Image: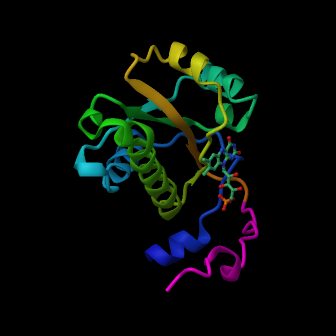
Amino acid sequence: MEVKTAIRERRSIRAFKADPVAEEVVEELVQLANMAPSAGNLQAREFIVIRDDRTRESLAAAAGNQMFIREAPVCIVVCVNYERIANYGARGRELYVFHDTGAAIQNVLLAAHDMGLGAVWVGAFNEGPVKRMLRLPKHIRPVAIIPVGHPVEQPKMRVRRDPSDILRKESW
Ligand SMILES: Cc1cc2nc3c(=O)[nH]c(=O)nc-3n(C[C@H](O)[C@H](O)[C@H](O)COP(=O)(O)O)c2cc1C
């Protein structure tokens, strides 16, 4: 699939079949995630693959009962690794880590779409319970949950702002 096509066609998918997603497919998604740029190529990000029913149920609960997290056969939790970004000081800690993980998340969403899978970027969750259930050490911070599965919906494109609205007048 053309990159431009994937960008245009991708949608947040929040309804999944129960069919499993093969281990190799998830591995490839993680590899493609980490092909994204990262500050100083430090790759200050980590990925946790969750298939276990009870853990997905707890993740859904921590995310305000977004039950599609439980429905998807697999979830990828994207985390920052603060140790890896330490050399960049405050800017690394407060900003670059979110560039690094955001770029990786977008790669997963686009690659999943290219593979005929559906996925959604979930940022609304309580970090405390997620850190505890996944037993994450202090330097690992979960920033997004990506439920992945075979889609059972084909949502329409959500409206985007007009270019005149997002292109600042100061552009030159
Ligand atoms: C930082 C961030 C956090 C998000 N959190 C959630 C979330 O918690 N639950 C959800 O259903 N969608 C979440 N989304 C997905 C957005 O709602 C979605 O991308 C947006 O409505 C545009 O729709 P589209 O992805 O289909 O183009 C999040 C997206 C981003 C970038």
Q: Where is residue 47 in the image (x, y as percent from the top left)?
A: 40, 35
Residue at x 61%, y 77% (from the top left corner): 168
Q: Which colour scheme is used?
A: rainbow
Say which of 47 and 131 sits in front: 131
Determine if residue 145 is in view: yes
The answer to which quarter of the image holds residue 26 is: top left
Determine if residue 1 is in view: no
Task: Give the left or right position of residue 41, taking residue 102 as reference.
Answer: left
Q: Position of residue 169 (x, y in %)?
A: 62, 82
Residue 102 is one of the magenta-drawn residues: no
Of helix, strand and loop, which mostly describes the magenta segment?
loop
Residue at x 23%, y 36% (from the top left corner): 87
The answer to which quarter of the image holds residue 136 is: top left
Find the magenta span and give its range.
Answer: 154-172
Q: Is residue 19 above or below residue 62?
A: below
Q: How many marks?
A: 0
Quadrant that contains the N terminus: bottom left
Task: Give the left or right position of residue 125, taking residue 104 as reference.
Answer: right
Q: In this view, does 42 lie above or below 118?
A: above
Task: Give the left or right position of residue 49, taking residue 86 as reference.
Answer: right
Q: Position of residue 46 (x, y in %)?
A: 36, 35
Task: Give the left or right position of residue 63, taking residue 96 as reference.
Answer: right
Say which of 68 and 100 sits in front: 100
Residue at x 53%, y 13% (from the top left corner): 132
Q: Position of residue 88 (x, y in %)?
A: 28, 40
Residue 161 is one of the magenta-drawn residues: yes
Residue at x 73%, y 34% (from the top left corner): 66
Say which of 25 and 11 sits in front: 11
Q: In this view, does 109 lie above or below 114?
A: above
Residue situated furthest bottom in the rendering: 172
Q: In this view, does 123 lie above or below 150?
A: above
